[in-house]
Image (spheres, coloured by chain):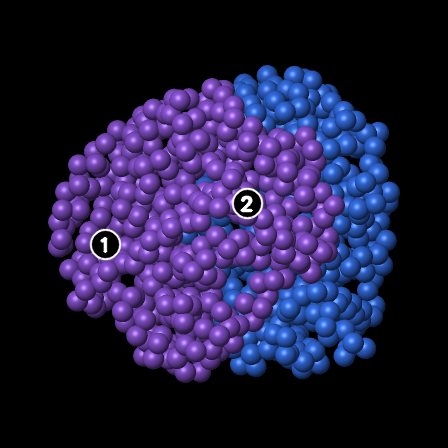
Amino acid sequence: MKAVLFFIIALSISAFAQNSILNVELQVEKYVLKNGLTVLLHRDSATPLVSYHTWYRVGSRHEKIGITGAAHMLEHMMFKGAQKYSNKEFDKILHANGITNNAFTTYDITGFYESLPKDKLELIMDMERDRLSSLLLKPEDLISEKSVVAEERRWRVDNNPQSLLREQTMEIMFSGHPYRWPVIGYMKDINSYTIEPLREFYEKYYGPNNAVLVIAGDINIEVTKKLVEKYYADLPIRTLPKEPLYSIKPLKEKKIIKLFKDVQVPSLMLSYPSVPDQHPDAYALEVLSQVLANGASSRLSKELVYNKQWATGTGAYQWSLKQAGIWGVFLSLKPEAKDEQVVSVLDREIFRIRHQLITQRELKRAQNQFMSDFVEGLSTVDSKARALASAEIVSGDYKTLFTDLEKYQKVTVYDVRRVAEKYLNPNGRVLAWLKPQATQKASK
Amino acid sequence: MKKLIYRFSVLIFCHAIFLSCSHKSVVDVNLQSKTQYKNERVEQLENGLKIYFIDDQSLPRMSLQLLLPVGVVNESIEQAGLNALTSQLLDQGTENKKALEIADLFADSGAEFGVQAGSDFTILATSALITEFNSVLNLFSEVLMNPTFPHAEIERARQQTLVQLKSRQDRSGNWADLLTQKNFYQNHPYGRDMLGTEPSLKKISRQDVIRFYQKNYVPNQARLAVTGRLNPEIEIEIKKQMSRWKPTLKFDSQKIDFQPSLKGSVTKLSSHHKAQTEIRFIQPGISRAHPDYLKLRLINEILGGSFASRLNQKIRDDLGLTYSIYSSLDTRNSAGSWGISTFSKNETAQKTVDEVLKVLKKMIDEGVTQAELTAAKNLVKAQLPRALETSDRLAYNLIALDFYGIGVNYLIRFNQNIDSYDLNIINKALRNFLKPDQMQILIYGQNQ
């Protein structure tokens, strides 16, 4: 073991949140094996369960044109068998041992996770090690899995106009960067994958030094450490390729997308380039989202849903990726809502928030919501494991899970106005409409 | 798990005592293996409300989940959507506060007022940090007991719901689910969209909403679960507030019998979604309180309950016909169904239907194997601690089981009952209940 660190995080939020006595404690042991595998262990014996998360620092960002979706395809192939646990066996063994499992791929991360009875810990380590070290990647498995992923793309994107709208927005927002293509990939690439680029991808990125392992639940820390050593310590370090430096072309104009589809109800997505993960402005941008459009007490909901009754729902978000970010608003509209009237209210509210301070009550409300969400996010063993894995892989330090909360509490009304002024640039945004097909003619 | 069973064993007796008491009873129900759960117990107020207190000191929060035995089954067909509308309007104005004021006050505490209107019951819920709980409790009580249903708010909610109804068709999977339920349940309320229909919504008046509320949103047979960092002061305050909730003289929860069609059918409907065809299978199932419920859960697990199930292995993994296929039991108070849900590209939709039918036939012809049964038992038993992992989940299970008249014995004997089913029992249940010839199949895609 390269380093063994022991942390006890005891956080008293009362120090920075008036009238709040939030005291959350999470005991985590973090260490890094000689081969670079980062391990986080958290003991919670409330239920006889263990949550096992293996996350890799690889996503669709690491692909290139022609093999878009490869990271996601490889995630699927990770269930198709390795040297010891062959195809079909993998899921059957998990099932037979009361283990549930799944995986996900994003622009930056690929994660695998299982929820298991506590006495199955060694079994899952053996299985995860097997597919991390000796994935078979057989061409015959790829044939059927390509069809599965093609169906997934039809379901997620082609048959889902909202996703198509998102796909088109990303192409504009991230011109010149791999974030411009969808995580699932384009259909032509899905249909033409071969084993070779997937194997290359696997060999490049699926190394212990590119992974974070989180084991949380009813575990004995010392026994678990020995098991981690036994199953992972001899895995070789992979030489990670140097990532090309991408430059995202700044968005210097108002772009408008109009997608006419056979939908009954229109919607609108407004996107601005913002900041990546760990950027200090991300916290104020999230407060801004809450105040402007999240929940029935937000400004846009009050104006568009309640007063004008032009919308049925509003939402806003700061979406931080590793190398870039988007700040966006989403509106579900009523069919009779007039485009120009909706945009006029939207622009007016954005203008207000860029030039006037939000109230202390609005700020406190948003901060209370973050605290509630933080606490709710620690209610199960799996949610704790997920939160730890996410914080560790995004920032390199799981403790940001706690310090982030502090940063939300330190946001001021001035910060919110400053970030609104800085990032919500009226001359650099994408306004994407999804509209019923029947309205296309009138629109022209 | 042994510890869990032991503690539940204590409960059997206590719960039986509790149910025999009609007024103001206090019973200790020690329900969980979680070390931080203490002093779980049920009290019944004089107005009939049962309160489940579950002390959970693990996080600085409190939550409230209220189960009201009112749902779609309580509506007439002419007033379809009345329950959803009524529940949605609770926080849209009270004697002392207007809609936006209520929204602001919940939000000030970092809380939300959640409503889930269902076919048999409706859940109202909220949660908050412990420091905010008193104000959230006051608001919760106010919207529950003193809504005023202002005209303007009814109109606003009605218009919102009409748009929601329109947008149902924008997600083909959800629309296929609704069509399947409608075909299966025909005129039974279970076949209706919870939100109602355009004509029914347009007819509902303010008086209808008020009458429905006064008749059904009463404490008589309601169950409130309170979880989190309890202390005597909070408990006294909750009981004090809930005691103000006025009961009706007589309240009967609604149960409407259903005789399903035993005839299989294939319905092909055209969808404007061009890329994929949604496929649904549905056949008669069982109600939630049926004694064979656990047997069917095991069979369902083998058929289509997980990645290792027969349907998933054959239709997805071997044939690559879909990204997702699963079977599920939908068990309600009066009846239930057993269904299979999947999708495939238009060209392979019929092949998918044929292959699913082959999987069903093979399963019935050959029965399930011992290895499959053992695996399913392990998986289903492992789901119990997950289902009870948080105090909120435990609370939800307790109030829902009580509603269905099943009681906590279901949890106490869960593993024991699962283990008692051998291969013969399961294969007999399989042949009794799984009926491919009674499947109603919906194929919903382009140019059907």
Given the image, on which type of amino acid does mark 1 rest? Answer: Lys
Which of A11 and B120 lies nearest the eye of the viewer?
Answer: B120
* Residue identified by numbered label 1: B50
In the rendered structure, which amino acid carries the disc numbered 2? Answer: Phe
Q: Is residue B221 visible?
A: yes
Left or right of A85? Residue B370 is: left
Chain B, which colour? Answer: purple
Q: Nearer the viewer, residue A174 or B214?
A: B214
* Residue A153 higher or lower than A433, as above or below: above
Q: In which quarter of the image is the C terminus of chain A?
A: bottom right
* Rendering coords of residue A115 (x, y %): 51, 33
Which residue was labeled with disc 2?
B281
Q: Which residue is drawn at 49% across and 57% down?
A: B182
Q: Which chain is blue?
A: A
Q: Name the spot of residue B243 as percent of width and height, x first.
A: 20, 64
Say which residue appears at 36% left-offset and 45% top-offset: B287
* Left or right of B261 on screen, residue A406: right
Q: Chain ID for label 1?
A: B
Q: Which quarter of the figure is the N terminus of chain A placed in?
A: top right
